[in-house]
Image (tube, rainbow, N blue to C red):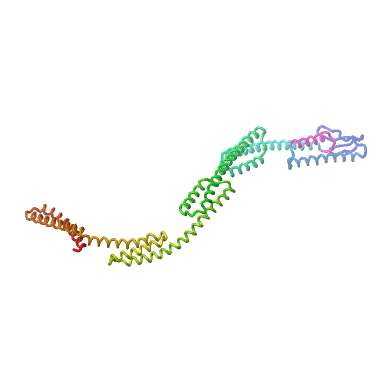
Amino acid sequence: MSSDPWGRVDETGTVYVRTADGEQVVGSWQAGSPEEALAYFERKYEGLVVEIGLLEKRVKTTDLSAKDATTAIDHLRTQVDEHHAVGDLAALRVRLDKLVETVEARREERKAAKAKQADEARTAKEALVAEAEELAASEQWRSAGERLRALVDTWKGLPRLDRKADDELWHRFSHARSAFSKRRKAHFASLDAQREDARKAKEKLVAEAESLSGSTDWGPTAARYRDLMAEWKAVGRAQREAEDDLWSRFRGAQDVFFQARSEVFAERDAEQQVNLTHKEELAVEAEKLLPVTDLKAARAAFRSINERWEAIGHVPRDARPKIEGRMHAVERAIQEAEEAEWRRTNPEARARAAGLTGQLQAAVDKLQEQVDKARAAGNDAKADKLAKELEGRKALLDQALKGLEEFGG
């Protein structure tokens, strides 16, 4: 018979393992010595130790599910309970019991983590739904559309909730996206219609602009082009391709007209500059007639100068007031000389001037006499009043005498 601290082999070859409940039969051994029998069943025990150790490591370091871990523990516990190994089987049961506790603890941790993850996922999805519903009313079509697409990607990365809750949130989320898409589609359909109307309106503007490009009616045509430009801006934009093509034609028609006008105006400006030089020479010639000493000769000379002036044509607009002002000054001086000569030589006017002077002289003499009488009578108040009236009549008499002098005295 052979034995060790955990087992023995009796004389019949039966192998026993010692437990707290007494010896338990492990098996029988007939092929060799008792020592070999114990060694064999001890190796089976070591195998169980290794398997339990590996399972402990897997539970500790991997994401082995609680279900798979429990199945593995039950399998090992069955082997231990069947007493087919020699060794400290009670110690193995203790390790398996602790392993059960560890698995249960891990199960609870995972359950709590899963619950927390579900709460976080719900909160995140509710936030996505709220933002999507807010974006559904936006008119920032591009940025809102891009943001909604990003929200979908975020949604796909979140864990699923229970079916009912997940379906309800997804329904709201999907509805918000659909509402936005519907509004955006309607907006761009309306925009397309507006742009089509704009294209038709601008086609008409381009046709008119092109029909005017060859006009030589410079002022009215330029004004009409300004009106066409204002109408163009008020119409709004057509589709991009049509807008670019129509604008090119519209501007091209204007450029043809304004280029032609510029060339004509440049030629006209050069001609008017030459005209200005000639008129400046005539203005100098006219100014030499002043002061007027020989009215008849001055009048004839000015008439000749004016005829040549009228034959010259236009001068630049900004120079016109000054050069014409010089000629008008000479013309006014000659007219004033004519008026003075007329007054001097007109018998009727001379007679009227003489009569007026006589009347004023008589009035002055009479007032002087009245002033003297009032002074003599001591009536100074009346004398002062009459004296003031006398001063006024004397001033009128002086003016009349000067006028009379112009008629030759």
Q: How many marks?
A: 0
Q: Position of residue 407 (x, y in %)?
A: 21, 62
Residue 154 lies in quadrant: top right
Residue 13 lies in quadrant: top right
For the point 67% across and 38% down, which residue is it?
Answer: 159
Magenta stretch encompasses residue 311 = no
Magenta residues, start to end: 66-87
Q: Position of residue 77 (x, y in %)?
A: 80, 35
Q: Position of residue 89 (x, y in %)?
A: 81, 36
Residue closest to the far right: 31
Describe residue 106's horizontal placement relative to residue 394 as left or right: right
Describe residue 404's horizontal placement relative to residue 196 as left or right: left
Residue 297 lies in quadrant: bottom left
Up-down: is 349 above or below 70? below
For the point 50% across and 49% down, which residue is it?
Answer: 228
Q: Nearer the viewer, residue 157 or 183?
A: 183
Q: Position of residue 160 (x, y in %)?
A: 67, 37
By secondary structure, the bulk of the magenta-drawn segment is best described as: helix
Describe residue 20's horizontal placement relative to residue 387 as left or right: right
Magenta stretch encompasses residue 86 = yes
Q: Nearer the viewer, residue 185 or 158?
A: 185
User: Which quadrant, please, contains the C terminus?
Assistant: bottom left
For the point 36% across and 61% down, which residue is it?
Answer: 324
Q: Nearer the viewer, residue 230 or 301?
A: 301
User: Which quadrant, please, contains the N terminus?
Assistant: top right
